[in-house]
Image (cartoon, rainbow, N blue to C red):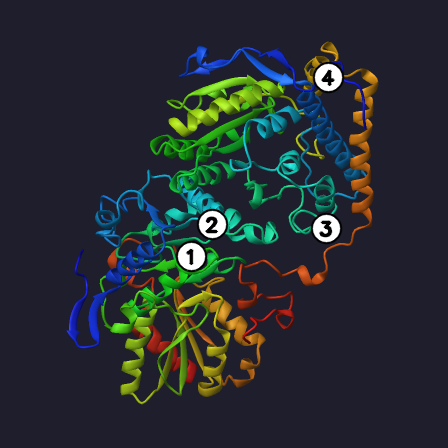
Amino acid sequence: MIFRISRSCFSSISVKLPPFKVHHLELDQLPQTATTTSAELLAYYKSMQLQRRMEIACDNLYKQRLIRGFLHLADGQESIYEGLHAGLTFDDCVITAYRDHCIALLRGDTPHQIIAEMMAKQTGSTKGKGGSMHYYKKATNFYGGHGIVGAQIPLGTGLAFAQKYLKKPNVTLIMFGDGAANQGQLYEAANMAQLWHLPAIYFIENNLFGMGTSIDRASANTKFYTRGDVIPGIQIDGNNVFQVRETLKFAKKHCLEKGPIFIEAMTYRYHGHSMSDPGVTYRTREEVQQQRKTRDCINYVKNIILENKVADEHQLEEIDNTAQNEIDIAVEQAKVDPVPPSTELATDVYVDNQNHFIRGILYKDSILPKSQ
Amino acid sequence: MLRIVHKLRSGFAKMTVREAINSAMAQEIERDSNVFLIGEEVGQYQGAYKVSKGLYDRFGKSRIWDTPITEAGFTGLSVGAAMYGLKPIVEFMTFNFAMQAIDHVINSAAKLHYMSAGGLRTSIVFRGINGAAASVAAQHSQCFAAWYSQVPGLIVLSPYDCDDARGLLKAAVRDPNPVVFLENEIMYNEAFEVPDNVMDKDYLIPIGKAKIMREGKDVTIVTFSKMVKFSMLAAAELEREGISCEVINLRTLKPLDRNTIIESIKKTHRVVTVEEGWGQCGIGAEICSVINETNAFFHLDAPIVRVTGADIPTPYAFNLEELSFPKAHNIVEAVKLVLK
């Protein structure tokens, strides 16, 4: 796809960042602007569209019963994932709970692998044995993909512990929501992180609702960026990809020099908590529509592109269509992929599976260790 | 360095189970820089039960980590460190406290390799005292052998003597899977003669293999941990009455060594299981079912007799606690029942 860009791909465009709120930090430590380029703007736009289209496709597949079980979609929050991708490296670890498809995408899985996994095919990221909540990729330091709210927090703190133990110049991004922010294990883990100066970024995706419960009904203190007590914190607009990116760059530097930090990113999910939640019993349809109209993270980048004449509406539509096409092809491929063979039922229970006894439904169906 | 081994005669030394665990940990921490010990009071306090005595002085705070009293936090942290590639030894002051962290043992560690289709692994050991101690009452006396043994993805070990403690703990640290290692406070003080080869820095015991402590031909006693001691005492007493007992020390609870049990039954035709934990859904219940489901059933001359802890929260009063857990005389009685 070739189109004319009205200015060189590399001449910089300056973007003013929204205001920060800080806790145990000085505002002047944080940048007021971010720099970007035409090429970068288009790359962010395309990538966020791909995320958006992928999540919507999953919604459709679920309604067709081609995806089953739990499905937690992140459409509306794409700028957070784009921002973390831009602000950190593959040597920095990322861990989250179950709203993890977009992170899997940005950490190296293809749309086909991600969709095939949810459609329970053997070509899925985890061979169809994990599902929507269990994506992982060791090679790019993406550690999941966890179903138990809050469990990822001490786990991520352990990743940071290991990075420090092995003297790596890297950090761990520990992602969780406003609902998880009341979990005791967060405070247990953050306490150790602060005591031991671990390079842990505690990143709260505050989309205002923990399942059906608003932050006001769940948290006595809704200033999540202050909940780290003596640990510094920053509140940002999670729907601004630049603010996410710049804050993570700042956080990385802070973590490697001093220790943990709390970041609260204000955002909004268009879907309910999961596919079984229509998302309009605890908030109004008008509120959701208003968010879409005025705070959409992809529109924000689109407006910068249009204002700076980086591309026009028609060119952006082409990008949209390319993204949609990529997803459509992935879906069609996944539809015809085979399910995991029954021989996969009892593999990978242990690292050395061949040395272990695994009981079947009937004793006679059990798998014996190779030596027997 | 602490001199912990007392030479008796050439080729043998005498040491306590506590010292056996201590020496095994020291050797593994020395051997592999990714191995570290973490838990409450393991460092500067020298260990709540002095099992990690001397390790902090020898290895320092980068290898021996004192934690706040936050089991969910430090267990999750350790599992996360293992996900990255380190090899934590997590000490629970007792496994009763590990209930606060059990989500991480099971959902974060045990199931991870399967959920990630082999992508991630956690080579981690969760160790600490399990079962009854002395007058520590209901919340500090539970045996967790059955709970952990049920979980796919976990290995569950329970040593009896110094040989077991050293060989199994070293094997546990080197195993790429998550291992639950159930120790016993009363056994910590017991001393055993230990041949030189057991002190070797690479002495390992195979996981999944039980040990026949005493050969016999009339009854098979299947047991583990402290109950091995009472089973051996019972066997000695029964010998005086002309009854010959084969005592099997399971060593590994998961994977259970079916074959050793089955081969023994083919010889003796009668089985008594002995455990300290509650009877319902316990280790003895599993052994009964395993025997029932295999050709071993047809070698039985009598129903299996189980000796278990009474199905009650543990009382504090000394005399009541004595009535709560199996002793040698209960095992003697069980053997006579199965022979009737």
Q: Residues within 10 Å of mark 1 (few under 14, many from 20)?
A: many
Q: Residue at x 56, y 67 (%)?
A: A354
Indicate which label's residue lies in the foreground, 4 or 3: 4
Disc on the earlier residue, 2 or 1: 2
Q: CA distance from mark 2 to mark 3?
A: 29 Å
- Label 3 sits on residue: A123
Q: Nearer the viewer, residue B289 or A121?
A: A121
In three-dimensional space, the C-alpha distance between marks 4 and 1, rounded to whole angstroms, equals 54 Å
Q: For numbered disc 1, what is the local secondary structure? A: strand
Check whether the beta carbons of the residues at disc 2 and disc 1 lie within 8 A of each other.
Answer: yes
* Res A240 seen here: yes
Query: Could you tell me how far apart the alpha carbons at marks 1 and 3 are, in whole angstroms?
Result: 33 Å
* Chain letter of the residue carrying label 3: A
Q: Are marks 4 and 3 on the same chain?
A: yes
Q: Amino acid at mark 2?
A: Val
Determine whether, in the image, residue A337 is placed left or right of residue A264. Answer: right
Which dot marks residue A302? 4
Identify the chain of the residue marked 2, using the numbered disc in the image: B
Both on one chain, marks 2 and 1? yes
Q: Residue at x 54, y 72 (%)?
A: B290
- From the image, which quarter does the N terminus of chain B lie in? bottom left
